[in-house]
């Protein structure tokens, strides 16, 4: 079963949002063009309570992109984003969401962030995505979304750990830090993640 996982294609990560990914809006038509290739499409959604500890606003004398130790692990402090029941947390309105069979929400625990679509950053709480896909008989997953170097990256690493084959559709993704993305691509390739463009889907 050909499966696509859309990672956090949400308004707050689009240009003009509080945690905008450069050119994040440009992936929307690419994703829509890819959807027809897949038998199963699922999505993840950052879904933070308003007092999430990953927000810089929740820490005295801290600003966005500062780093702290939070519950024993390194944590980047972010601008407030993807707060539950806000427009910023919604999937982008132009995504053909009728193709999305299920949405897995993450980052709901105020004490720990959750970059991966599979687990929180402490690897203590599962979102249920792995079990859902395995029940469907999925063995190979294609990934796209935002940001390619953070939430997509950690989702792909966890997919490999869970026994799936993982492929990044690069032009259907955008990184937050473009200058570091080549290093990220080298790292995921060492973990067995494949990297393709959307035009290569037709050859698979």
Image (cartoon, helix red, strand yellow):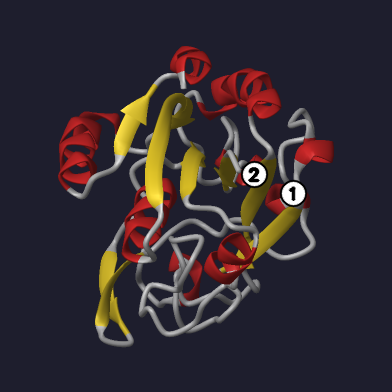
Q: Which of 35 and 77 is in front in this view?
A: 35
Counting from the top left corner in percent of width and height, residue 48 is at: 62, 68
Q: Please give the name of the residue rendered at 42% of the width and 85% of the height, measured from the top-left corner.
A: 124
Q: For the residue labelled by badge 2, is the local secondary structure a helix, a strand or a loop?
A: loop
User: Which residue, given by chain and number where applicable, does mark 1 sit on?
Assistant: 90
Circle 1 SS class: loop
Could you say which is closer to the camera, residue 146 or residue 5?
Answer: 5
> What is the CA distance from the residue labelled 1 to the residue labelled 2?
5 Å
Q: Does the image show residue 103?
A: yes
Relative image position of residue 44 (x, y in whole percent) = 61, 55
Q: Dividing the picture into quarters, in which one does residue 15 lie?
A: top right
From what the image shows, is residue 4 above or below residue 103?
above
Residue 10: numbered disc: 2
Instruction: Give yes or no for contact between labels 1 and 2 (Cβ–Cβ under 8 Å).
Output: yes
Image coordinates of residue 104 in percent, x first then y, are 65, 62
User: In front: 60, or 80?
Assistant: 80
Badge 1 local density, few (<14 within 10 Å), some, or many (20+)?
A: some
């Amino acid at each position: 079963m050909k499966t696509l996982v859309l990672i956090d294609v949400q308004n707050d990560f689009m240009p003009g949002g509080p945690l905008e990914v450069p050119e994040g809006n440009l992936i929307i038509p690419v994703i829509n063009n890819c959807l027809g290739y897949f038998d199963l499409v699922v999505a993840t959604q950052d879904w933070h309570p308003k007092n999430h500890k990953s927000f810089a606003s929740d820490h005295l004398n801290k600003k966005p992109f500062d780093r702290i130790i939070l519950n024993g692990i390194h944590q980047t402090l972010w601008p407030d984003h993807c707060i539950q029941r806000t427009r910023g947390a919604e999937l982008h309105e132009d995504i053909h969401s009728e193709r999305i069979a299920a949405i897995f929400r993450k980052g709901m625990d105020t004490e720990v962030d959750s970059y991966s679509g599979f687990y929180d950053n402490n690897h203590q709480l599962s979102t249920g995505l792995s079990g859902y896909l395995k029940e469907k008989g999925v063995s190979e997953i294609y990934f796209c979304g935002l940001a390619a170097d953070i939430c997509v990256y950690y989702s792909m690493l966890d997919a490999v750990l869970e026994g799936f084959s993982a492929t990044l559709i690069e032009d259907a993704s955008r990184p937050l830090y473009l200058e570091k993305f080549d290093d990220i691509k080298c790292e995921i390739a060492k973990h067995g993640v494949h990297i393709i463009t959307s035009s290569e889907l037709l050859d698979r």
